């Protein structure tokens, strides 16, 4: 689907929209979620918590958004967290040099290239400004994306920063969590929360913004035991969608083969890549649209020894949803040195600083991609039908409850059904305004998978119709069975065919 169609739907249903949109001078790169968008976003977080965090026995924390300068000295963010920028001499528009070149060459340009190399490439490709078409640019320079926050007043003011990633508090909290949890390595610590990056020219809606939400897991392990994974046999034959360096195509390679042939550095890495792929498939992304793209040394983040970017094919191209980084002991060793605290552990008579494998996901990007992949249009006799093909567990509601008409006691029965379902823990909505067709259309557009309709037959036999969103097919069921049916449909939309 075209990007404009999704943005149009988002605006029409207030799924997401520009922050402070009533002000002309509102900065770009900041977004608001409306009531339905917020429900979908929260459902995604809950899905992540249950399907990735809980099932892998990870521990979740909630760390501070603001951290002192020393944290980012240790992490090298103040030194190395830079983007290459270039400015149009005519209209003064700023661009990331690597992204400007990628739009011209249709190939990946490593942001780690020197400013001189990027400047040379811009001249060689005769790049032009997307805004005014000028071909005159400044020399490429580096721009640090950290957002500074001064804490305290006057002479007691302390230099701090908004976190650019949620993981730093995980590293700072690791030793305390390790000791108090009484768990051995490998130990996964998870966090979901806001991060901030002063992006040069945020574009593509939620895909690149200055304030965003991350869902991260840092897995701490003994590097000497990277191949000692208790449950590896569960994924040994599971095939990963890998795009290796220099291959130019996606290959389906089993976890066991990937480790044996040293395509992936160890069983621990392969195991969690499998869990990542399974998670995204379960949330509604087809395997055929996925890939783990191996990053070259000049593409990887400054802290990574090995990186597999999990990417999804969308209407706007391949979009990175999760960075899977082998960060070695870079972070704990850096914080130990800067803080002068011992962050090593002692297991099996060995004292060492754990290594880290990271699963860093962007929630806003996942939200956008799920909408993009689920947006459907159907030609109808009277126009067209638009709906979101979301799975029930991330849809804003499992069902809408409607009286056929708002009279003759049908509204009272529908309200009782609605209240009963709410009391049984189901996320449902009630709507009695407008024609039944328009009500169906409204919930279709926001991805609600089912509609429960109370009609005149309900008064005779205590049955209602359940309408399935995608097919618009309807089936009659007993009111007394609704809670049981909804529970099964929540886990498996395909159960509708068995009714």
Image (cartoon, rainbow, N blue to C red):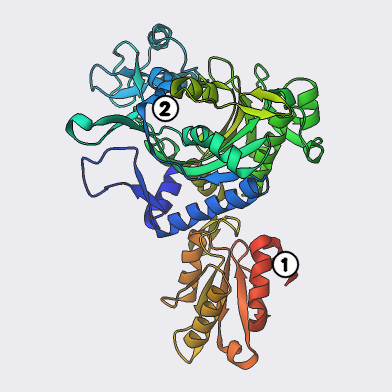
Is residue 410 at least partly visible in the picture? yes
Q: Residue at x 60, y 38 (%)?
A: 178
Q: Nearer the viewer, residue 154 or 58?
A: 154
Q: Nearer the viewer, residue 487 or 146?
A: 146
Q: Residue 352: which disc?
A: none
Helix, strand or loop at label 2? It is: helix
On screen, residue 364 above or below 291: below
Q: Residue 497: which disc?
A: 1
Nearer mark to the viewer, of 2 and 1: 2
Q: Residue at x 31, y 15 (%)?
A: 135
Give coordinates of residue 491: x percent, y percent.
67, 61
Distance between the alpha carbons at the discs numbered 2 and 1: 55 Å
Residue on which the image places disc 2: 71
Q: Residues within 10 Å of mark 1 (few under 14, many from 20)?
A: few
Helix, strand or loop at label 1? It is: helix
Give coordinates of residue 10: x percent, y percent.
41, 52
Q: Residue at x 58, y 91 (%)?
A: 459
Query: Horizontally, is 261 left or right of 163 in the view?
Result: right
Give coordinates of residue 484: x percent, y percent.
68, 74
Q: Nearer the viewer, residue 318 or 311?
A: 311
State which quarter of the image contains the C terminus: bottom right
On screen, residue 190 above or below 384: above
Q: Residues within 10 Å of mark 2 (few under 14, many from 20)?
A: many
Query: Horizontally, is 455 left or right of 78 in the view?
Result: right
Give coordinates of residue 110: x percent, y percent.
50, 17
Q: Residue at x 39, y 6 (%)?
A: 116
């Amino acid at each position: 689907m075209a990007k404009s169609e999704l943005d149009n739907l988002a605006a029409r249903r207030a799924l997401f929209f520009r922050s402070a949109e009533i002000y002309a001078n509102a900065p770009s790169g900041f977004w608001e979620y409306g009531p339905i968008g917020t429900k979908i976003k929260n459902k995604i977080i809950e899905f992540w918590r249950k399907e990735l965090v809980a099932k892998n026995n990870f521990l979740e924390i909630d760390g501070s958004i603001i951290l002192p300068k020393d944290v980012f000295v240790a992490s090298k963010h103040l030194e190395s967290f830079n983007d290459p920028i270039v400015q149009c001499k005519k209209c003064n528009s700023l661009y990331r040099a690597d992204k400007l070149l990628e739009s011209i060459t249709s190939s990946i340009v490593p942001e780690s290239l020197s400013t001189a190399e990027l400047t040379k490439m811009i001249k060689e490709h005769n790049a032009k400004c997307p805004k005014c078409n000028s071909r005159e640019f400044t020399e490429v320079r580096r721009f640090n994306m950290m957002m500074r926050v001064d804490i305290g007043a006057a002479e007691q003011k302390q230099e701090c920063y908004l976190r650019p990633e949620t993981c730093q508090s995980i590293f700072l909290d690791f030793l305390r969590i390790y000791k108090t949890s009484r768990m051995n390595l490998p130990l996964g610590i998870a966090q979901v929360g806001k991060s901030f990056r002063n992006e040069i020219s945020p574009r593509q809606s939620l895909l690149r913004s200055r304030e965003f939400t991350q869902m991260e897991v840092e897995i701490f392990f003994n590097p000497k035991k990277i191949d000692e994974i208790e449950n590896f046999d569960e994924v040994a034959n599971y095939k990963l969608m890998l795009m290796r360096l220099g291959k130019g195509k996606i290959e389906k390679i089993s976890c066991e083969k990937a480790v044996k042939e040293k395509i992936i550095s160890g069983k621990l890495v392969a195991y969690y890549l499998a869990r990542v792929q399974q998670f995204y498939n379960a949330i509604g992304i087809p395997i055929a649209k996925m890939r783990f793209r191996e990053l070259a040394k000049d593409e990887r983040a400054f802290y990574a020894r090995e990186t597999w970017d999990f990417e999804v094919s969308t209407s706007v191209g391949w979009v990175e949803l999760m960075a899977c980084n082998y960060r070695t002991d870079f972070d704990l060793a850096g914080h130990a040195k800067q803080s002068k605290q011992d962050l090593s552990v002692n297991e099996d008579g060995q004292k060492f600083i754990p290594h880290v494998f990271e699963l860093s996901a962007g929630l806003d990007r996942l939200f956008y991609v799920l909408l993009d992949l689920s947006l459907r249009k159907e030609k109808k006799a009277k126009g067209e039908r638009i709906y979101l093909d979301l799975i029930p567990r991330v849809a804003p509601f499992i069902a809408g409850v409607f009286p056929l008409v708002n009279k003759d006691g049908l509204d009272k029965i529908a309200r009782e059904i609605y209240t009963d379902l709410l009391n049984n823990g189901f996320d449902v909505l009630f709507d009695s305004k407008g024609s039944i067709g328009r009500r169906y259309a409204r919930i279709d557009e926001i991805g609600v998978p089912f509609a429960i309709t109370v009609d005149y037959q309900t008064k005779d036999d205590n049955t209602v119709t359940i309408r399935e969103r995608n097919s618009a097919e309807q089936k009659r069921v007993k009111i007394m069975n609704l809670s049981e049916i909804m529970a099964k449909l929540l886990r498996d939309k395909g159960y509708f065919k068995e009714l």
